[in-house]
Structure formats: structure tokens, C-alpha cells
Amino acid sequence: MAINNNIYQNGYIINYDEGDQSLQRAKGTYTKQDGDTIHIWRDGDMLTAMALKYYGNPRLWYYIGDANNIFIPFPDDIQIGSQLVIPNIGNNTK
């Protein structure tokens, strides 16, 4: 999986009733690859901590989220014991 350093390039703006705006990134798609890892979700796990552990960079959490169809504002909805795919993104972890 190639790293897209501009994850907001194809994003979109959400306008809220209160007048606030939010720039949302376009959700990626993922196809299972050789070299993927399976992580068993445990109590206290965080996507940023998993990205740090597996990629050395907590800002790459969105690869894990996208590969597992996790809606990030609600990561607590992940059931303890769930198997999450940790995508093999190669050495491109900057």
C-alpha cells in the first residue's frame, strides 16, 4: 500500500448547523496483502498506539482504521477480542 502524504486531497467539507466546518479526508479502501498482521483488540488499545507499535509513527493510525472499516470518532465501539488487520505498508512510514 503506497502512502498518500496528502490524505485530505480528495476530502470534503462538512458544514455544521452552528456554523462550524470540518475538513474530512476521503476514506481509503484496502485489499488484503501478504505481510499483513492480525492484532487482537484489548482493553485500553488505541489506534495511534497500534500505529506507533507496528509502523513507528502514531500518525499512520488511519491505515488501520480504513483496513478495518472503523469509524474513528467511535473507536470504543471495537469489541475486545476483535481481530484487526494491520496493513503491510512496507517501509514508507514517514
Image: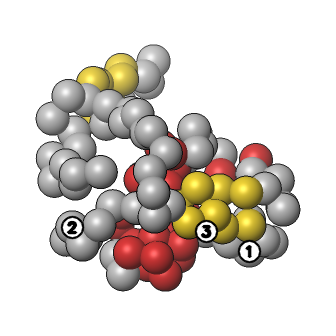
Residue 53 at least partly seen: yes
Give the percent coordinates (x, y) of residue 42. Answer: 78, 71
The quadrant where residue 47 appears: bottom right
Residue at the spot 84% in from the left edge and 61% down from the top edge: 80
Give the percent coordinates (x, y) of residue 13. Answer: 28, 25
Which amino acid is tagged 1? Answer: Gly
| Lower position in the chain sequence, tag 3 or tag 2 | 3
Q: Mark 2 points at which residue?
A: 92
Q: Mark 1 points at which residue?
A: 44
The quadrant where residue 69 appears: top right
Element class at badge 3: loop
Element class at badge 2: loop
Q: Are circles 2 and 1 on residues that touch, CB within 8 Å?
A: no
Residue 61 at least partly seen: no
Q: Which mark is residue 4?
A: none
Q: Are circles 3 and 2 on residues that touch, CB within 8 Å?
A: no
Q: Are circles 1 and 3 on residues that touch, CB within 8 Å?
A: yes
Of discs 3 and 2, which sits in the foreground?
2
Give the percent coordinates (x, y) of residue 27. Answer: 39, 33
Of discs 2 and 1, which sits in the foreground?
2
Q: Mark 3 points at which residue?
A: 46
